Every structure is written in C-alpha cells, then in structure tokens.
Amino acid sequence: MVKSPITGGGVRLRINGSEHLLQIEPRVTLLDALREYVHLNGTKKGCDQGQCGACTVHVDGRRVLACLTLASQVEGLAITTIEGLAVNGSLHPVQEAFIRHDAFQCGYCTSGQIMSAVGCIDEGRTESDTTVREYMSGNLCRCGAYPHIVAAVRDAAQAMDSGEGRSR
Amino acid sequence: MNNFEYVRATAIPDALKAVARQTGSRFLAGGTTMVDLMKCGVELPSALIDITRLPGLDTIEAGPTSVRIGALSRMSDVADHPTIRKEFPVLSESLWRGASAQLRNMATIGGNLMQRTRCSYFREPGVYGACNKRDPGSGCAALEGINRGHAVLGTSPSCIATNPGDFAVALVAFDATVHVENGKAQRRIPIDDFFLLPGDTPDLEHPLSSDELIVAVEVPTSSALRRSHYLKVRDRESYEFAAASAAVGLELEADGRTIRDVRIALGGIATRPWRARTAEEALVGRTFDEPTVRGASRLAIEGAVDHGENRFKIDLAPRVVARALLTVGGIT
Ligand SMILES: Cc1cc2nc3c(=O)[nH]c(=O)nc-3n(C[C@H](O)[C@H](O)[C@H](O)COP(=O)(O)OP(=O)(O)OC[C@H]3O[C@@H](n4cnc5c(N)ncnc54)[C@H](O)[C@@H]3O)c2cc1C
Ligand code: SF4
Ligand code: FES
Ligand code: FES
C-alpha cells in the first residue's frame, strides 16, 4: 500500500523514458504535473474536464486523458507525451502526415490529435473514414480541420503499414 | 479541487480496510467521474483509495451460461473482447458507443455503474444552489430550468435527472447481477435493485454502503443476448450521451416468426436504466412484424411525463425501441 498525505510527497513519474521525482499534492493531475512541474507544455489544456481530448497522452501504451488522471495514480507507469514521439530528431510518421496534409489551423488541438491518432492506428481502427471519425471522436478541433485530420490518420496508417514509417 | 489523502491499495482487504477507516473516503478507479466531479466541487472526498492496481479484478470470462466481467475491466477491453463482440453484441455496442476511445481506456466497469447524472445544475454548485441530489432539501433547479436532457420516466417532484449510462441499460435488459463485498461479507445484487428511483431521496442512487466494493458484474447468457443490439440516438454521431437509447434482444420460435423471448430497456430518458416489461409482455407469443413491434414499442414509455423541453423524448423513445427491434429481427 502506498500512502500520500494531504500535504503531498514525492511522486516518481516516468515520462518519455526519463524519471522525474516531483513534490506534489495528491490533487495534482497528470496534465498539471506535465505542464507546471515538468515544463513539458506540448500537452494542452482545453476543457480540463474530459470533453475535448487536447490533453491526450499515452500511459503504458494506451491513449488516455491527462486532465482526468491524477499524477499519483500513474506513478511508475510509462508515460509518453507529444515530446516523446520523435526519435533522434526524426518525426513520427503521424507527425509527418499531419504536416503533409495540413491537418491543423491554430494547432491547439494538434498534439492531442496526434497522440490519439497514434493510438487509433495502434488499435487498428483505420479501415475507413467512418471508422477513423468514430475512433477519433474524442478529439475536438475548434478550427474544424477534421477532413484533413482524417486524411492524415489514414495516410499515416498506410505509411506505417507499408514499412515506410516506424511503429512507436 | 479539494485536497485529500491518496492511498494506493495493492490488495482487496487493504482497500476495504482503508475505505472504512475514515468518513469521506472513496474509491478511485478510472477517475473519469470522480476527478471530473471533484473539479466541479460536487465530490469532496477526504481520502481517495486508488483501486486500479488491485490484482485479479480485470478478468473477463465469457462462459457458456454467463459472462463475468471483473469490476476493474476497462470499457475498451470489454467492448473489444472477441467473444463478447461476436456472441453478445449488446454488451460491446453499449460500451463502444459511450464516451471516447481515451475515456474508455480509463473508465472501469465498476465505475461505469456508479457514474452520476450529467444534469448541469447538479454539476455546478458554485452557480446553482438548488439541487436535491447534491444538497437534500435545497430544491430542484431543473424543474423550471433547461431540461431538454432530463428524464420523462421515473421522475419525482424532487429530481428529474437522467441516468446517463449506456452499458447499464444493456445490463438491465439482460438481468445482470452485481457482485459486491466489504471486509465482512459478499453479496449479489440483482441489477433491478441496483439503481434506485429518486423519490424523496435523490441523493441515494444505489443500495451500496460506502465500504462496499463492486468486484464484478455477471450477465446470464441467453438466445436473446446472442441476438441483441444497442441503438443510441444523440445530438451528434459520437462522443455524446444518449437523447434516447434502447438495448434489445430477441428469440423466435422454431417457426422463425413467433416471439419466444424479447428484452427491452431504455436509456437517456429515465432516472434509472429503464426496463420496459409491459412492452416485452405484449410481444411474447405474437408474430414478429412491423405493426406489432411499433404498437408494443409505444408501451415502453407508459406513464412518461415531460417537463417542457424534454417532450421530444416521449416521441423519440418508442421509435428508437422499434428500430432496434426491427434491426435484430432483420426488418430494416
Ligand atoms: C466527457 C465524458 C463523456 C462520457 N460519455 C459517456 C457515454 O456516452 N456513455 C456512458 O455510459 N458514460 C459516459 N461517460 C461516463 C463514463 O463512462 C464514466 O465516467 C466511467 O465509466 C466511470 O468509471 P471510472 O472507472 O472512471 O470511475 P471513477 O470515476 O473512478 O469512479 C466513479 C464512482 O464509482 C465509485 N467506484 C468506482 N469503482 C468502484 C467499485 N469497484 N466499487 C465501488 N465503487 C466504485 C467511485 O468511488 C466513484 O464514486 C462519459 C464521461 C465523460 C467524462
Ligand atoms: S434534476 Fe436532480 S440533479 Fe438536476 S437539479 Fe434537480 S435535483 Fe439536482
Ligand atoms: S483538457 Fe483533457 S479532455 Fe479537454
Ligand atoms: S487546429 Fe485549431 S483547434 Fe484544431
């Protein structure tokens, strides 16, 4: 059993492969831990209530919402953020596809879209535009870049399938 | 968000002991209801007992006589379970048509049954004082307020909040059982007894005491469960709660037209997941055809009362039931 008092204590987070020991209260969400304590600002805060997907990250390889996850809850688990997708400076195929398809306008939703798209492709939900729309529905885009986002996800899935890209 | 003590339990007895130790302690599973409502200022726990690392509670057993789903199974894992998808469609559909892919990866089956209403007055204590569910005796702002999403069945003068769950509708249609335990005893609660009507006490939603842990839900298999469907109608195509939904199942006699068994439950329109037994009884023994189905579907909302904006649900719900039944019956 692990206990953390109201006043908080040390929480060890494994983010993009490196360990961070944070002195935080139990009420700090993973989203706030990433942005305010680890200063990884790529993960965005849209609604802070589970309704927009801007805060999507991966925990143990699954896409989840950082705004409804307490940092204490994911202690020791593998957390991947948008900053962790590129390897040695080369972009992830999904990042490349978003650029190729101009799949954003203001860009605020984009890191969440990309993290969610990587999950969507991993889960094998890319056989049609309809399937991509359904399984990407948790990521809202206020600019309405949806047609380009759907195209980017399907293109990235194909690129990764044919081995041009690399898997996560 | 209020501050609280965090306890990560690694064995069931520890979790049960920890939750019983101080008043105001609550279980934390996926957090998609709990953390959300803490941010709204609705939930103010003194301690959260994190149960997500308890071993053995996330197994899914699809056997010949029943499907047993551990309380910590994630919505996505149950929805994507090959046997459940193939053999018991309503259980998978009612899960993947809820929330979003990210939320389904977080949310657990136990938490899902315990999710709270989306009534905006309930969710905003800072703005709206009157809510009997949050603060017994304070009134109900929804009665004279914006109530397009509110219930038309099972309401009381105290509360008209809709139970927003989808999976629970399927559980109610197919007679599931909820397995719970505390430090002293285990018990099985029939799903019909698990969701309380608001009556004069809308703050009480379940018969669980605060130290009881849901460990599993069990759904008996049946021919109707194998020929089942969940239809969810909503304001947008995905990532939205139901305006009206129906979980249905059908078994025909050997003649291929006489109804032997039929299950109907509705969601999005009632204060609890709503089993439509009168409609079921009107169908058993009858020939399965469109006029019969449409006639019986209207019985599903017997006794419905609207509060103005939610009137459309009284027209919509029977159509959703009929379309769901016609779909499983092969008439589209
Ligand atoms: C934006 C959004 C959209 C959504 N859309 C839908 C939808 O379309 N359809 C739908 O059905 N749902 C929807 N939901 C609700 C979602 O399904 C629930 O929030 C989720 O299932 C709750 O599970 P959890 O594990 O996250 O529970 P938690 O938030 O961890 O817990 C919820 C409650 O249950 C209690 N609890 C949890 N586990 C147990 C247990 N094993 N025993 C006893 N008590 C327990 C907790 O103490 C708490 O009170 C949506 C939620 C959000 C935020
Ligand atoms: S409908 Fe129920 S939950 Fe909503 S304001 Fe009225 S009492 Fe509160
Ligand atoms: S910020 Fe998490 S879903 Fe909107
Ligand atoms: S690009 Fe602006 S919100 Fe999506």
Image (spheres, coloured by chain):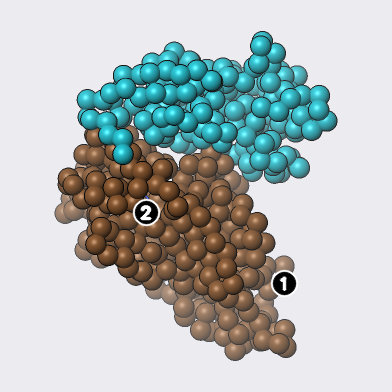
**Closer to the N terminus: mark 1 or mark 2?**
2
Chain B's colour is: brown
Kindly tell me whether mark 1's CB lies below 8 Å from ligand 1.
Answer: no
Query: Which of label 1 and label 2 is nearer to you?
Result: 2
Task: Tell whether B268 sits left or right of B224.
Answer: left
Across and down, in percent, residue B55 comes to 43, 48
Check disc 1 and report the residue beneath it: B331
Task: Determine whether the residue tagged by mark 2 lies in a helix, strand or loop.
Answer: helix
Question: Is residue A48 visible to the viewer in this orientation of the structure?
Answer: no
Kindly tell me whether mark 2's CB lies below 8 Å from ligand 1.
Answer: yes
Rendered view: B178 above or below A98: below
Rendered view: B132 above or below A76: below
Chain A's colour is: cyan
The residue lying toward the viewer, choosing from A21 and B139, is A21
Extreme top residue here? Answer: A89
What residue lies at 58% left-to-right and 75% top-to-bottom? B222
Q: Residues within 10 Å of mark 2 (few under 14, many from 20)?
A: some
Across and down, in percent, residue B252 comes to 66, 82
What residue lies at 21% left-to-right and 63% top-to-bottom? B200
Check disc 2 and report the residue beneath it: B114
Kind of residue sitting beneath label 1: Ile
Which picture quadrant has residue B202? bottom left
Across and down, in percent, residue B320 comes to 57, 64
The residue lying toward the viewer, choosing from B153 and A140, is A140
Task: Determine whether the residue tagged by mark 1 lies in a helix, strand or loop.
Answer: loop
Q: Quadrant of the N terminus of chain B?
A: top left
Q: Which mark is residue A53?
A: none
The residue lying toward the viewer, choosing from A81 and A107, is A81
Q: Quadrant of the C terminus of chain B?
A: bottom right
